[in-house]
Image (tube, rainbow, N blue to C red):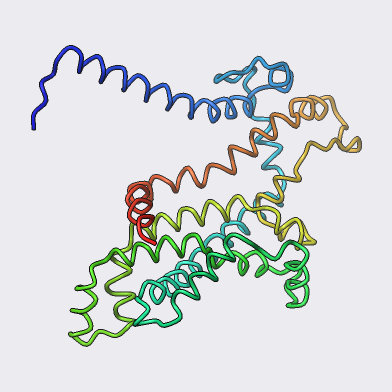
Amino acid sequence: MVRNATWGTKVADGALIAFMVLISLTCFFPLLHNLAISFSSPAKATGGFVTIFPQDFTFASYEKLFEDSTFFRTFFVSVERVVLTTILSFFVSLLMAYPLSRTNRDFALRNVYMWLLVFVMMFNGGLIPFYLIVKQMGLMNSFWVLVLPMIVNVFNVILIVNYFRGIPKELDECASMDGAGPWYKVFRIYMPLAMPVLATTTLFLIVNIWNEFMTGMIFMRNIEDAPLQTYMQQLVVRIDPNLLKTVDDVKRMASVSDKTLSAAKIFVSMLPIMLLYPFLQRYFISGITLGSVKE
């Protein structure tokens, strides 16, 4: 159907476009403001003179952030944590979702396990039982304490289950008639068809893992073995009088403040997710809508 481009229609389209541009700028403004603060001098940032353009442009905050090896060590710990946890969670969620997407005739205890998943998603045992379990398992100050608790994400599993239940049953029956077993169905039929929801849940998981810092604060004794967010959460401007030997050293320390350094930390922590998101964005909408309709 072709709609006539009347004067009222053009005005409505223009108003809608202007409204969407305004919303986009509103969402984008905090990022530009934070970036501008990170490149501004402490006096301008603290005085509130920075909007979206840096004032007294300087790289001092980033020089302070990158000057020690601990930053790079924790960065690679976070990268290793994200990669390993994402791979393990991908296969665990896939293998959990397939049997739970079957009918009660195929999997008699399906409803029981689904209610258990819903229960543990809404309620948890608390921090103290979690700490005791980690200590009894000998995972204190271990890299695996950063990985194992985040492998099973119930919300992602439920999304994948609902997506699987939306795949036509005739496809599954045809595969069974051709002699396909459960493993063949999961990896050769269901996984390729479920790429939108799998990409969406993977993006959710990566963002969650990358931003998580409490586990490192509680269970890691050495800051160099903690993830990046834990290190950056504890990073503040510390002035050592023994290092202030020249006038240039005093000027360099005076060019950094907690506010500008925090802005630099926020931008650096967002950068990997900002670079990854465009590759998974095209799956995002379809993965959520198709995976959230059925029970």
Please state if 87 lies on the left or on the right of 208 as rendered: left
The image shows residue 263, relative to residue 271, as above or below, that is: above
Residue 15 image position (x, y, % from top left): 31, 17
Please state if 211 lies on the left or on the right of 4 as rendered: right
Q: Which residue is drawn at 70% across and 59% down?
A: 215
Q: Specify the farthest residue to the bottom.
A: 179
Residue 268 image position (x, y, % from top left): 59, 41
Q: Which quadrant holds residue 22?
A: top left
Please state if 10 lies on the left or on the right of 77 as rendered: left
Residue 91 image position (x, y, % from top left): 45, 71
Q: Residue at x 62, y 38 (%)?
A: 266
Q: Which quadrant holds residue 58?
A: top right
Q: Residue at x 65, y 39 (%)?
A: 265
Q: Specify the farthest residue to the right.
A: 242
The image shows residue 67, relative to residue 185, as above or below, that is: above
Q: Which quadrant holds residue 188?
A: bottom left
In the image, 57 versus 258, the foreground residue is 258
Q: Residue at x 39, y 61 (%)?
A: 198
In the image, 204 versus 72, the foreground residue is 204
Count of residue discs: 0
Q: In which quarter of the image is the N terminus?
A: top left
